[in-house]
Amino acid sequence: MNFLYRLLDIPFVYKLSQSLLAPGAHKFITSRINHLFDTLPAAKKLLDIGCGPASLLWQYGHFPVGLDLSHKYAVAYNKNGMSVVGSSDQLPFADNSFQGIFSIGLLHHLPDSVAESTISEMCRISSGYVAILDAVFPKHPLLRPIAYIMRRMDRGEFVRRQDHMISLLPAKRKWVIDRFTYSYFGYELIQCVSLPFTSTEALSRHALPDRPQTPMAKKAEGFGMSRRKLDDSQCLVRRRART
């Protein structure tokens, strides 16, 4: 298994594995990110934490600074952008250095203590928004056995359930929480977005609305992939400070 994980450090193998093991993921996630950019305030300075060999944000004309722990990924990233090799829980940037921070598929590779430090660091260096998209276990594993099994086999050893993921968010900021399916195998992501507003009302105005159904969305429903909306009481979350 370790040999397979080392193979995934090769950018070409990583991209190929994403296409084979998560069919449809690229289109679903890029559609969601496109909607995020329509919703979030404009930001000129962006950072993609855990960027891998390429940033999904490039497709929208955004070229964020990338940060990854892998030197191989950083070299590949530098062919089209600028990256830094570094640890996500000790970001080598000053406070408020960026107007927007993205983390896509990183946190399930990190234990709780490191994941919490990473999110705190993201908030520290952001003068604007923080957007996190990360893998979670299916809400109903029996209905999505392939997704559940693949999550158990994920090289990210810390795939979490939704409530566990939410518990890692710092209490000093307010978060809009959403959850969606992004692959024909039924994989699910949680989306946590924090904006630089102090009032619940201001943050709620930027909650992600429903989108009209596209042909792809209709096709997804045919695979039992209808989007799961959270109750209103769950959509806006502020974690209580731990005692």
Image (tube, helix red, strand yellow):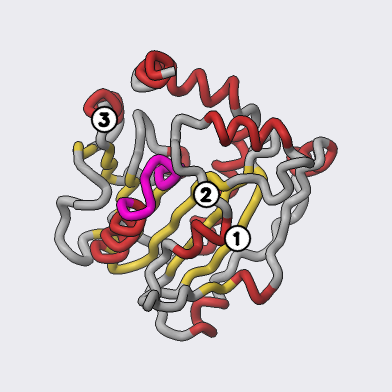
**Looking at the picture, does residue 169 appear above or below residue 173?**
above
How many residues crowd mark 3 within 10 Å: few (<14), some (14–19), many (20+)? some
Is 112 part of what is drawn in magenta?
yes
Q: Quadrant of the N terminus?
A: top left
Image coordinates of residue 141 in percent, x first then y, are: 71, 43
Question: From the viewer's perspective, is 133 left or right of 82?
Answer: right
Residue 163 image-quadrant placement: bottom right
User: In which quadrant will I find the C terminus?
Assistant: bottom left
Q: Nearer the viewer, residue 63 or 117?
A: 117
Which range is magenta?
A: 104-114
Q: Residue 70's mark?
A: 3
- Residue 147's disc is none
- Residue drawn where x is 22% and y is 27% of the image: 71
- Residue lying at the far right in this picture: please name it: 222
Q: Position of residue 182 (x, y in %)?
A: 64, 41
**Callout 1, which amino acid?**
Asp
Q: Is residue 223 left or right of residue 70?
A: right
Q: Indicate whether 193 appears above or below 158.
A: below
Residue named by callout 2? 160
Image point (50%, 43%), residue name? 159
- The residues tagged by marks 2 and 1 sit, at their Cα atoms, a distance apart of 15 Å
Pointer 2: residues within 10 angstroms few (<14), some, or many (20+)? some
